[in-house]
Image: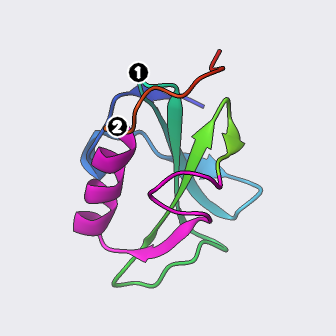
Amino acid sequence: MKEVNNAVKISDLVFEANKTSGGSRAISNFDNGYQASVITGGWAYATEDAPYEIAVMCNYDLCYDTPITNDVLGYLTEEAANDILQQIANLPKRGGTK
C-alpha cells in the first residue's frame, strides 16, 4: 500500500482496493508518530452522503486513547474527514513511537 506523509485532506490520499474490507483504504503518516487509516466502501461505517471512516493509529495499531476519539469515526463527509485528519496531525508527539 502506498502511504502518504502528512496528508490532511482526503484529496491528498492514495486509495487502494482493500480485499479485507471490500472497499478502499488509504494511510497517512504524521510526523507526530500517528497514522490515519481512512476507508470507504465495503464494510466501512459509511453511507453514500458520508462515505468515510477514519481510525487513529500509532505504530499501525488502533489508538483508543486520543482526545479525538476512543473508537473509529464513521459516517464522515469529506469536510468532516479533512477536519479529523488535521486534528490527528495536530496531536502532540506520541511517546514510544518507532
Query: Is disc 2 surrounded by few (<14), some (14 to 19) or many (20+) residues within 10 Å?
Result: many
Residue 47 percent coordinates (x, y): 46, 84
Numbered range of the magenta stretch: 64-89
Residue at the limit of the structure toward the top, as seen here? 98
Residue type, label 2: Ala
Give the Cα distance between marks 1 and 2: 8 Å
Check disc 2 and report the residue beneath it.
89
First along the sequence among labels 1 and 2: 1
Q: Are marks 1 and 2 in contact (CB under 8 Å)?
A: yes
Residue at 34% in and 37% down: 89
Check disc 1 and report the residue beneath it.
31
Residue at the limit of the structure toward the right, as seen here? 20
Residue 90 lies in quadrant: top left
Residue 57 percent coordinates (x, y): 60, 42
Residue 55 percent coordinates (x, y): 56, 55
Residue type, label 1: Asp
**Left or right of 62 in this view: 78:** left
Residue at the limit of the structure toward the left, as seen here? 79
Residue 86 percent coordinates (x, y): 28, 46
**Left or right of 82 in this view: 29:** right
Quarter placement of the N terminus: top right
Residue at 64% in and 48% down: 63
Nearest to the observer: residue 76 or residue 15 = 76
Query: Is disc 1 surrounded by few (<14), some (14 to 19) or many (20+) residues within 10 Å?
Result: some
Tag shown at residue 61: none
